[in-house]
Amino acid sequence: MDWGTELWDQYDIIEKHTQSGLELVEKYVKFVKERTEIEQNYAKQLRNLSKKYNLKRSGKDEPDSRFSSYQSFLDVVNEMNDYAGQRELIAENLMMNICIDLTKYLQELKQERKMYLIEAKRAQQSLESTYKQLDSSKKRFEREWREAERTAQYAEKTDQDLNATKADVEKAKQQAHMRSHVAEECKNDYAAQLQKYNKEQSQFYFNEMPLIFNKLQDLDERRVRKLAQGYILFSDTERHVMPIIGKCLEGITKAGTNVNDKNDTMVVIEQNKSGFERPGDVEFEDYSQGINRTSSESSLGTPKGPMDILGRNRSKNFWLFSKKSKRFTPEKSTPTVTEDFAHLPPEQRRKRLQQKLEEICRELQKEVDQSEALGKMKDVYEKNPQMGDPASLASQISQTSQNMERLTGERVKYETWLAEALGRGETLHYKSHTFNNNGAHDALSPDGAHSDESIPDPSQAIYAEFDDDFEDEELAAPIGKCTAMYSFPGASEGTISMQEGEVLAVVEEDKGDGWTRVRRHDGDEGYIPTSYVSINLKK
């Protein structure tokens, strides 16, 4: 069924229907644009929200950086930022694939419809023109035929009139004959015009207009199909990004499952453990017996070991809530930051000294490597003068030697402080700490020559308790297992390297110094930072 056959007489309905269809396309395009604006605003708000709460990843020195709950929160915020990106992608695809495409297609349909309506108007005007010619010839024929009848009646009346002359009769007959001839010609012209009009009318209603209506029908059907595709794209645009959105949501779920309350508890302990012993009982001072108080007898009877570490603060009362309770601390005072970190509690001081010592050792290793490279370069210049002047390296060699001497002095200084922090009255042992593949490094004199004297090496070990604990000793039975939460290079003497996720056997518990002795499956043993592993001891 087609419009040309079934709706041959419904031109106005077809014109109105096609116009309404185009208006529906415009309305849908406007609807999608508004939906796009909503998506863009939603994505923008999500971006701003993520930016507001997405603090940059804290460095290792930040107190919150090692909490799994904190890192998971940052993961949630980042996933939400990625989710906002997908909403932006939806808005972009809706605009490109539906709004822009349909708008362009709509303009083409409007031009095509306009062309078909012009063709219909032309055909109708042509038929109307033919009909006017038919009507004109018909009226002329009617007028001339009536005039011919009147002249014929007059000629007959003149012929019967006895008073009329022969000339009058002949003149009346000639006039009647002429009018009759003209009327006949008008009749033939009217018949020809009628035949022409009927032919054009048949062509108009059976060929021209049905063809135009069928073209408009095809246009309307194409519009409907294109609109249907737009409806489908409206859904598919969002469905295509659903897998990525699903991954964002999975990432948020994973961030929640990655939160480890036990690990966070261990981090809090590690970051804030002071290393102090609990205060002892307050001794009874019997004034009734005349007991004299001496400077060595404190009214609090505080243990001498950990409280002595407080230095100038050891005479103060050790209150548990001293930082917050005005009842115990009417005056607030900020401790002076010292180079040896003596202002920190023992445990925190030890950790900071270890970190500082590791930094110094890394810098010293760089200077040693630079010194070796300069020495080799100077040897090459001396053997091949055309490659360079050995004297040009003197300033660099001198500066490197000064840097090595300065760093070595700092290393010895911090090792001494670390030994003090680790000592606690124990006997400490040190082993040489090497900086090259040969187990020791050579110092360069200012002129670049290698000297036999190595850099002064008193107590070069970073961790004093790492001695010959493993030499000529039978393997101890494991007391538990531990899983590495972070990788550890194990570059220092007495330590052992480990990779994140590696499972090791625990041989000796942490004695309060922050190190645990472990063993691999191949029998290698060494110390690792207790805070780097999750430990499960046998009961």
Image (spheres, grey):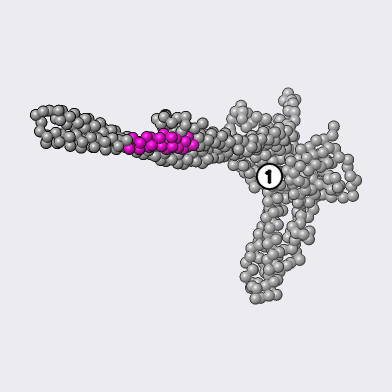
The quadrant of the picture occupied by the C terminus is: top right
Magenta segment range?
Answer: 192-220
Where residue 26 sits, quadrant-wise, is top left
On screen, residue 336 above or below 443: above
Where residue 231 sits, quadrant-wise, is top right
The foreground one among 18 and 323 is: 18
Residue 342: say if magenta. Answer: no
Q: Residue furthest left?
A: 163
| Residue 431 visible in rendering | yes
Label total for image = 1
Report the amino acid beneath label 1.
Answer: Arg
- In the rendering, at what x and y percent does residue 221 appear? 50, 35
Left or right: where 320 falls relative to 194: right
- In the rendering, at what x and y percent does residue 268 appear? 69, 35
Circle 1 is placed at which residue position? 352
Left or right: where 171 falls relative to 70: left
- In the rendering, at what x and y percent does residue 421 appear? 73, 44
Where residue 297 sits, quadrant-wise, is top right
Q: What secondary structure is the stretch in magenta mostly built from?
A: helix
Q: What residue is at 79 percent from the left and 48 percent from the top?
A: 496
Q: What residue is at 70 percent from the left and 53 percent from the top?
A: 361
